Amino acid sequence: MENMEIPITESPEWEALQKDLGETSFFKSEPSFQYLAIKKHTPSGPYLYLPYGPVADTREGFKLALNDLAELAERENAIFIRIEPRNPDFIKIFPKNTKKSQDLNPKETWVLSLDGSDEEYKAKLPSRLLRYYRNREKNGITIETSKNPDDIKYLLDLQKALAKQKKISTFSENYLRTELKQPFATLYLVKHEGNLVAAGLVFDHGDTRYNLQGAQTDEGRKLHATGILTIQLIKDAREKGLKKFDFWGIAPEGAPKDHPWAGFTNFKKTFAGYEVDFAGTYDIIRKPAKYKTYQLMRKIRRLI
């Protein structure tokens, strides 16, 4: 597993987060594969969820992981196994009883390499945002970091306003607080003359900084607070010795202009990064009758 790229969501650190959240999880690391399976409960019965997993370098390793997961699902009486392999090539060897599900984690993301000289690195950043960043103090903008779980309320308030505007969902306060308690998490707060205008939550794992959560006020938008914050996030990651900055999700190619992530995607692509495509979310069905009931209940909940 030494040369295998392990996403944070399939790591022992993410398992620690699940335990703090009160979840039941199963972690396994072998020479050819690794996975973290989280046991989720529904009225129809439990299922196993592997966020961006299982992880394997080869098809053979991926097959071994699926065999191991099948045994785990049998022991746990799971209706299905929800997988999100990072390698799209593995779709070709999915079991016959696999069905495409709605993507939970982003199927596409934008990654910025932090390698190279200072000149090469700065050339990847939008010149307009760099100008705003350099003038931040002159314009009354300050950036703070926090590891205090109580401070998550600032991000949550901004996210609630954004969720209402974009008609998207957000995480609960308990979930975000528990995330910030983890060693890999850092909260950034952007203020203008002492007033909060933007916030962001990042995770550092391996050689990558993941930019998972963020939001800004209307005033922050006028001040380009998110752009200034993103430059700071990237700058700190590079100074920390990290190699990649993962923007965590973009809209798929050809998505309509009113896609909820359209604005985010346009912003992220102003940075000279590259697109990474994953397989998406799929369900390996173990109990067909119960799976049909689960799907029906899911549709009803969405309608409600």
Image (cartoon, rainbow, N blue to C red):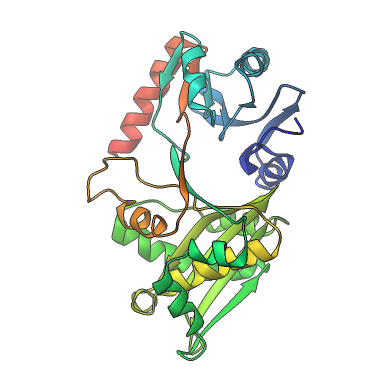
Residue 14 in the image: above or below residue 129: above
Q: Residue at horizontal 69%, vertical 59%? A: 181
The quadrant holding residue 177 is bottom right
Which one is nearer the viewer's eye here, 189 or 235? Answer: 235
* Furthest-left residue in this view: 257
Left or right: 58, with 104 as reference point: right
The quadrant holding residue 189 is bottom right
Q: Residue at horizontal 38%, vertical 79%? A: 223
Left or right: 189, with 110 as reference point: right
Residue 258 location (% of width, % of height): 23, 51
Whether residue 39 is visible to the viewer of this picture, yes or no, is yes
Which one is nearer the viewer's eye here, 57 or 285? Answer: 57
Residue 276 location (% of width, % of height): 48, 40
Q: Residue at horizontal 59%, vertical 30%? A: 53
Whether residue 197 is visible to the viewer of this picture, yes or no, is no
Left or right: 298, with 51 as reference point: left
